[in-house]
Image (cartoon, rainbow, N blue to C red):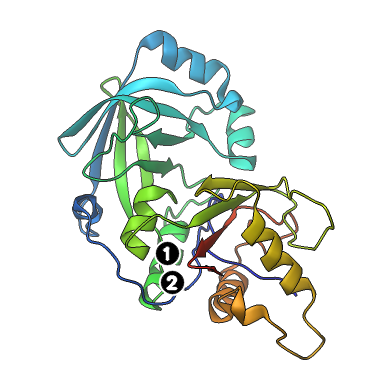
Amino acid sequence: MKAKIISLCLCVLLLSSAIPAFAASELEYEKLFEKDHILKIEIELSESDFQSILENPTAEEYKSATVTVDGETVENVGFRTKGNSSLNSVAKSDSERYSFRIKFDKYVKGQRLLGLDELVVNNMFSDPSYMREYLSYEVMRENGVAVPETAFANIYINGELYGFYLCVEAIDDSFLERVFGDNDGNLYKQEIGSSLLYEAGSDYPNSELKNGNDTEKTGLKNMIEVLNEMPDGEKGGIEEVLDVESALQYIAANTVLGNYDSYNGSNLQNFYLYEHNGIFL
């Protein structure tokens, strides 16, 4: 059996799993993601730094930039390319239309944009409609699933229009605060090969702790062991460590919407696990 939680980070479709109702917080940055408005995101960085990014995009090296989103400006922000297969595909082509990650607290601890610590702007790779990722989020949102905030945006780099992108709230501290009311849990990003199969003595290197204090991955290891010990046809103790409804809804959604860059896909990657009050979501 495969289990799962908050999914994320793929080329075209990007989904999150359903979660129970928590005391979500209202954060000021939510006003940026109005559905009837196209954001204007202006990025200013030195020409030498921008050329360095374009000359070696797969390095995904952060550069310092000043970022303005609809008139709200933050200085000394981390800016880099992002992606995997989409990044490599663009790098091998004649295009320079990369996806980018904007991390407001990369160089200044605690720095945020209206409470937002990080966002990504996706190039909608291999989607001539520019709508697949956006509509996938909206389908899940309409069905009560906690997904990142999204909005379309025109991206300007050093004063020049760079392209039309989808702006997506990153799965990070501000997302956790908005959805759960706090960011006190342990958040793991699952890299390629994260099968959640039990391996005695393993530190599960494909599970990267992004937030939280469980550096030994004690809770994660326990959840994986309980998951793999489920007797055939029985629940065992799985409901004590995993929100099963959330996991099943995640799998169903990715199957229906064709999100193969997920736990459902052959690469077993680009999903998140969040341990909140002892239960993984």
Q: Position of residue 267 (x, y in %)?
A: 73, 54
Can you tell which quarter of the image residue 179 is in? bottom left
Could you tell me the amino acid type at mark 2? Answer: Met
- Report the residue marked by disc 1: 137
> Is residue 160 left or right of 97 when viewed as pictured?
left
- Compared across the picture, whether 111 is left or right of 189 comes to left
Residue 257, horizontal then vertical, whole percent = 56, 70
Q: Secondary structure at mark 2?
A: helix
**Percent from the top left, x then y, of residue 281?**
53, 68
**Residue at 57% over, 52% down:** 188
In the displayed structure, would residue 51 be above or below residue 266?
above
Q: Label 1, secondary structure: give it.
A: helix
- In the picture, measured across the screen, residue 153 lies left or right of residue 189, that is left
| Dots 2, 1 in contact, CB < 8 A | yes
Residue at (34, 50) in percent of width and height: 174
Which residue sits furthest left? 71
Residue at the spot of label 2: 140
